Amino acid sequence: MDSKHLGKNKLQKATEKHNPFRIPDNNKFANIEEKTTSNAQAKETDDYSPTKPPPIMLALTANYTHALQEIHRKFPKTENKLTKGCIKICPDTEDSYRKIITYLIKAKYEYYIIRPRNERPIKIVVKGLPFDTNINEINTNLKI
């Protein structure tokens, strides 16, 4: 039953034919050893990676260009982006972050800082409590 034409709904038996244009599929990188690291070594390298400080959002005031020029002169590696009516200043190091903040305070520019999620306070909603429940009781029960 090795017929090539078996009918409309029947499949033809698969036969292998020699293909002169076959591409070799050898893995050139099979001889290279894989470098494995343990979890302890990976954690050590993660601890020393420098984290970027949070961005500083400078409000658009009449003389914000003067502030940006001064920041760019003192800290040329900072990135400044215009976002939603504010200028997002992304300092490269913690030291430049602190110095930019002190400059903005001394020059009395309006700014705010976006804190990371792990440093923000947790907001809790408790449903189904009566209106006359004392707030201090709720706080003490949540602290337990």
Image: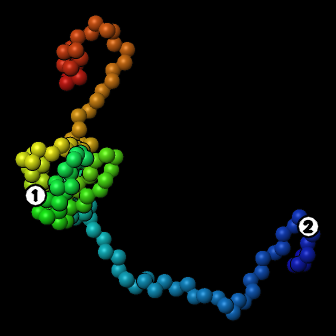
Residue 9: x %, y % from top left: 89, 64
Residue 100: x %, y % from top left: 12, 54
Residue 43: x %, y % from top left: 22, 59
Residue 134: x %, y % from top left: 23, 10
- Foreground residue among 10 and 120: 120
Residue at position x 64%, y 88% in the image: 22
35 left or right of 2 in image: left
**What's under tag 1, amino acid-wise?**
Asp
Q: Sequence order check: which comes first, mark 1 or mark 2?
A: 2
Residue at position x 33%, y 50% in the image: 83
Task: Name which quarter of the figure residue 42 lies in.
Answer: bottom left
- The answer to whether residue 54 of the structure is visible from this angle is no
Total marks drawn?
Answer: 2
The residue carrying mark 2 is 8
- Image quarter of the N terminus: bottom right
**What's under tag 2, amino acid-wise?**
Lys
Q: Are marks 1 and 2 in contact (CB under 8 Å)?
A: no
